[in-house]
Image (cartoon, grey):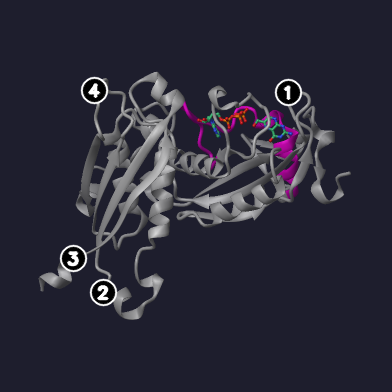
Amino acid sequence: MSSRSRPRDSIRLTGLTATGHHGVFDFEKREGQTFRVDVELTLDFRAAGRSDDLADTVSYVEIAELVQAGITGAPFDLIEALAEHLARAILRRDERIAATEVTVHKPQAPLPQSFQDVSVTARRDRADLLADPAADLAPDLAAGQTSGQDPAGASGAEVAAVLALGSNLGESAVTLASAVTALEGTQRVRVLKQSPVARTSPVGGPADQPDFLNQVIEIATTLSPQELLRRTQAIEAEHHRARGAENGEIRWGPRTLDIDIISYGQERISSETLQVPHPRAAQRGFVLVPWTWMDPQAHLAGRPVAELARDTADFDTVQPLEHAP
Ligand SMILES: Nc1ncnc2c1ncn2[C@@H]1O[C@H](COP(=O)(O)OP(=O)(O)OP(=O)(O)O)[C@@H](O)[C@H]1O
Ligand SMILES: Nc1nc2c(c(=O)[nH]1)N=C(CO)CN2
């Protein structure tokens, strides 16, 4: 019967607004502007209608988070590409979503004429996902700038990744805990281990900045490296991380939240937006010491992390938070 085979219900989320850096021009990437997204999900929510149970439908909260992460994440040149990315990410999020319509509005597009809005709409269903899997790649991966494959994206298998978190502005302990909670709440991410929080002296950047709190976590994820970077950058943005000199960011200066991808399985990635293993991790006591607390046997690019940690210049400054003066 057609009512069984063709979902006819919909969930609509309209007017989700955030600042993104998408655009063809350099100044658009640098300065950012407002993007607004409307989403319609086509699905069958008869079960939820009867049970009144969230587990029987798709939570619009998750869809909103995903859209926000897409808007604030790594920039695309075209709003078509952002719409495509969002539509595919939505379909991948939950297989009960049969189809989706995503409209991306760019009301501040750089046009000399007076105008109200410019928008594009992507209408995608599950058949589109299967037909063109390469389109799932994020901007720089699609451009073929990585040295490696996209292992999770390709096989769906979980990959273990190590993330390093740092904060020295605001309520840093609360921020780190909140960032870990955000990762725990991320679909396709499982937080496996957390190091104790360390107090560390700043390495690089202005000499007069406050001490950092640092933490290392291990996750298992089926997100691709670029998807993981988008998610970690969205979490940074949610915690008011300023990006870019025009927003007052100083290289290696004070920040509310920094999340670095230290390793992603055994992958070696060298793209414009992502280098893995993180190129400076092996010299950073503030990363390696908490990592050894969490996992004394850990290795980074074939070398024991405990050994690397002892050779770092900031080794002695790294103290467990509860024992710090
Ligand atoms: N492994 C990685 N993890 C996180 N960001 C990365 C990584 N490799 C490259 N990047 C890129 O680095 C850019 C700058 O990141 P960020 O501002 O966090 O650097 P930083 O923390 O100031 O310095 P550092 O990279 O030395 O820790 C990001 O926009 C991101 O695209
Ligand atoms: N102690 C410490 N120093 C830093 C840190 C950090 O997290 N902790 N992050 C930096 C850039 O990401 C630069 N310097």
* Nearer to us: label 3 or label 4: 4
Quadrant containing the N terminus is bottom left
Q: Secondary structure at mark 1?
A: loop
Q: Is residue 167 magenta?
A: no
Q: Which residues are magenta?
A: 264-293
Question: Where residue 209 appears, x then y in whole percent?
Answer: 75, 29
Left or right of residue 305: residue 71: left
Query: Which badge, 1 or 3, is on the more N-terminal residue?
Result: 3
Q: Label 3: which residue?
A: 8
Q: Residues within 10 Å of mark 2 (few under 14, many from 20)?
A: some
Query: Which badge, 4 or 1, is on the more N-terminal residue?
Result: 4
Badge 1 residue CB within 8 Å of ligand 2? no
Question: Residue drawn at (41%, 35%), measured in percent from left and top?
Answer: 20
Whether pointer 4 and pointer 1 mark residues with C-beta atoms closer than 8 Å, the reply is no
Amino acid carrying mark 4 in the image? Gln
Badge 3 residue CB within 8 Å of ligand 1? no
Amino acid carrying mark 2 in the image? Arg
* Alpha carbon distance from label 2 to label 3: 10 Å
Question: Where residue 41 appears, x then y in whole percent?
Answer: 27, 57
When the figure is inspected, residue 262 is found, relative to residue 23, above or below; the finding is below
* Alpha carbon distance from label 3 to label 4: 40 Å
Q: Secondary structure at mark 4?
A: loop
Question: Where residue 131 appears, x then y in whole percent?
Answer: 21, 46
Query: Which badge, 1 or 2, is on the more N-terminal residue?
Result: 2
Left or right of residue 319: residue 193: left
Residue 302 lies in quadrant: top right
* Alpha carbon distance from label 1 to label 3: 58 Å
Query: Which badge, 2 or 3, is on the more N-terminal residue?
Result: 3
Mark sitting on residue 206: 1
Question: Where residue 213 appears, x then y in whole percent?
Answer: 73, 42
Q: Residue furthest bottom?
A: 50
